[in-house]
């Protein structure tokens, strides 16, 4: 009976060093990328410590609830993708990843209490995705990220634009869509959001089935209402923190014919 219960409780997939090495890839700019996304991992594989020299680590779309303190051994890490897990608390050790430039924590179970103050020490961080969590407010440590350029806060429980945003002098893109803000126009006046984009672009193949369906419905609605035909523009390799972290983050800044498309109430950003 006990043996049966133990077997039933184990739902995650065990990752061996051999399996991990088979998932190692080389990026276009010669960086080492370890992609263990969507593999039903429910615990951080200890064998990954033998591959701590990787530059990019993707553990998205798994069953992770915690990230161990040993994450600080990944001293060369520039991309860390943990989106679509069950994470409620981040480790303090995460703040010691001084080379980290892009951090994706979208679609987890984070509250402000689950974000340690040490996160504000990520001096190299350029993009942070906290969308689709349980944030009612934003911890003050986010305001210490002086070089942060892109911040995703969509689909949370924010009732006002967090004051921590006022401490982000480099912020260029802010996504606060689908939060219970008291009034969107007043909320925009609260923070220094002039010139800040509220739209994210991503590839359709990075979306879940539900989000993809909603995006397609919104695309059809916009196409029917459009008064002036638009020219389709191809964005090869365009990604954002809600997809696998890759080297082409710079393409975020590209605009569609010098203007963004306002998708208003869509549940996911739209790619033309």
Image (spheres, helix red, strand yellow):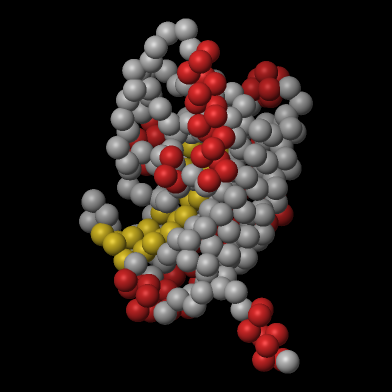
Locate residue 84: give its quadrant.
Answer: bottom right
Front-lying residue, 232 or 74: 232
Q: Is residue 259 above or below residue 67?
A: above
| Residue at the image position 49 percent from the left and 44 percent from the top | 207
* Percent coordinates x, y for residue 235 in the rendering: 32, 33
Pick the quarter of the image with the C terminus: top left
Work out which quarter of the rendered image holds the N terminus and state it. Answer: bottom right
Residue 91 at x, y = what percent?
A: 60, 64
Q: Nearer the viewer, residue 102 or 214?
A: 214
> Residue 227's spot in the image, x, y percent?
47, 7
Question: Please, which residue is most extreme toward the top here?
Answer: 227
In the rendered image, the vertical position of residue 26 relative to residue 153, given as above or below: below
**Quarter occupied by residue 78:** bottom left
Tell me if 183 is positioned left or right of 10 in this view. right
The count of marks equals 0
Residue under the image location 45 percent in, 61 percent down = 37
Residue depicted at x 50% and y 50%? 104
Residue 98, visible in the rendered structure: no
In the figure, 48 relative to 120: above or below? below
Front residue of 132/89: it is: 132
Can you give x and y, in whole percent of width and height, for residue 117 in the image?
A: 63, 54
Front position in the image: 190 or 249: 249
Residue for point 34% across, 18% down: 231
Q: Is residue 4 visible?
A: yes
> Is 172 positioned to the left or the right of 231 in the image?
right
83 to 41, vertically: above or below: above
């Amino acid at each position: 009976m006990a043996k049966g219960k133990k077997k039933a409780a184990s739902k995650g997939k065990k990752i061996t060093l051999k399996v991990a090495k088979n998932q190692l890839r080389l990026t276009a700019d010669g960086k080492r990328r370890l992609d263990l996304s969507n593999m039903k991992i429910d615990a951080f594989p200890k064998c990954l410590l033998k591959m701590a020299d990787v530059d990019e680590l993707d553990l998205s779309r798994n069953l992770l609830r915690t990230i161990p303190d040993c994450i600080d051994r990944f001293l060369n890490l520039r991309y860390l993708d943990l989106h679509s897990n069950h994470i409620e608390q981040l480790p303090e050790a995460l703040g010691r990843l001084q080379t980290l430039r892009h951090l994706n924590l979208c679609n987890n179970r984070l509250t402000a209490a689950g974000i340690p103050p040490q996160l504000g020490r990520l001096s190299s961080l350029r993009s942070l995705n906290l969308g689709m969590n349980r944030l009612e407010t934003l911890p003050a440590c986010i305001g210490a990220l002086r070089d942060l350029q892109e911040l995703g806060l969509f689909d949370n429980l924010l009732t006002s634009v967090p004051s921590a945003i006022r401490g982000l002098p480099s912020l260029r893109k802010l996504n606060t869509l689908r939060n219970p803000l008291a009034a969107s126009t007043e909320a925009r006046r609260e923070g220094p959001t002039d010139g800040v984009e509220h739209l994210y672009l991503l590839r359709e193949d990075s979306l879940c089935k539900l989000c993809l369906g909603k995006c397609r419905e919104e695309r059809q609605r916009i196409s029917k209402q459009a008064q002036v035909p638009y020219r389709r523009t191809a964005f090869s390799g365009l990604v954002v923190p809600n997809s696998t972290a890759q080297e082409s983050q710079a393409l975020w800044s590209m605009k569609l014919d010098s203007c963004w498309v306002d998708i208003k109430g869509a549940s996911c950003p739209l790619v033309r």
